[in-house]
Amino acid sequence: MSEFHLTEDQQDCLQELINIAMGQASDQLARYLDTFVYLKVPSIESVAAVELIQTLSQQQNTMAVVSQGFFGYEGIRGEALLMYQEEDSGRIADLLGYEPDELSQDEQLIDISSILTTTFLNVFAGQIDNQMSYNAPKLLPSIQNSISEHLQQMTFNWDLALKVNINYQVTDYSFNCNMILLIPETAIINIKNVLDRILAEF
Amino acid sequence: MSPSVLICDDSNMARKQVLRSLPEQWRTSVQTASNGAEALTILRDNSVEVLFLDLTMPGIDGIGVLQGIQKLNLNCSVFVISADIQPEMQSKVKALGAKEFIRKPVKSDILITHLQQHGLL
């Protein structure tokens, strides 16, 4: 946890990089849905690995989790989790406007998650002079323990989760989704160095 | 003579980015605000000629500031600098009187080109 203690300037810098990445991810989502997305300032918090598993296991109303791994240079890698709430499931289906037999709701969620995750991370990576590649996104089975099992089966040790709470309001609809980035220590150190480099330019 | 400038953004880094992108002779007469309410107070009490405005901010956002400027009938050139790049947002801010929409992160040459296009340089 202490590894990711950010100074006020580092936090401000990270928030701004995330705002820019969010803006472009929302623009992609808006184009995909052919609608307008209202943006709010996303809240960012870091959570220690142990705490996160506890918190997630206690969340009863999480409807679905889409998980996607990402890899960049210089030890930057991680897993992005997009978490949707139960009460939003119907809204997302309405929003996407797919015909019932066209794509299953699961496939819709995977589509939308992948757009958000890859656009977000591409823009974020661009700002820290990095470049990402991705694993295929997968939807975790909606059994109570599947998230904690999934987290424990990760191929790398992650020490910290960066939790970005994103709220999308799409004209008549609104849905919440949490984007959680699980990042190993090497990546954290790298990101902090990059933040310092950016800050030093000012 | 350099105009009186106000930079409004909730991020300190973003404010510095804008400041650094300004023409050098402008950088001495700059005020800053970290939210929409603060910006409106400064706009009301001072004669700000050029405003660089972020959109996504807690409390009164950039749209709120643009509406406030219209309501107070202030004569001030507004350049929106935002990460919310959706085309609909770009036309919305222009309809509310903004001179230009500039996407974040701001680049000095682009900012200066826009200032020249609007006869401010």
Image: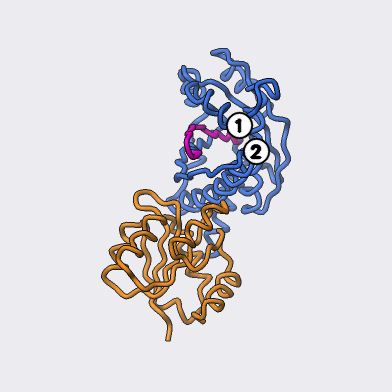
Task: Residue at 54%, 55% (x, y): give it.
Answer: A196
Judging depth in this view, the residue of A162 and B106 nearest the camera is B106
Amino acid type of the residue that numbered disc 2 sits on in the rendered structure = Ile
Judging depth in this view, the residue of A101 and B77 nearest the camera is A101
Task: Residue at 32%, 69% (x, y): give it.
Answer: B73
Q: Position of residue A81 (x, y in %)?
A: 59, 30
Q: Which residue is mark 1?
A: A96
Q: Position of residue A184 (x, y in %)?
A: 61, 35
Task: Residue at 46%, 20% (x, y): give it.
Answer: A59
Check residue A109 for magenta coloring.
Answer: no
Image height check: is B20 above or below B92?
below
Q: Position of residue A167 (x, y in %)?
A: 47, 37
Label 1 element class:
helix
**Within 10 Å of the Cα at label 2, are there few (<14), some (14-19), or many (20+) other Cα atoms?**
some
Mark 2–mark 1 Cα distance, whole angstroms, equals 13 Å
**Within 10 Å of the Cα at label 1, are there few (<14), some (14-19), or many (20+) other Cα atoms?**
some
**Apparent colour of chain A:** blue
Q: Which mark is residue A115?
A: 2
**Apparent colour of chain B:** orange
Give the label, 2 or 1, closer to the camera: 1
N-terminal label among 2 and 1? 1
Q: Position of residue B45 (x, y in %)?
A: 26, 70
Amino acid type of the residue that numbered disc 1 sits on in the rendered structure = Leu
Boundaries of the magenta span: A170-183
Q: Chain of mark 2?
A: A
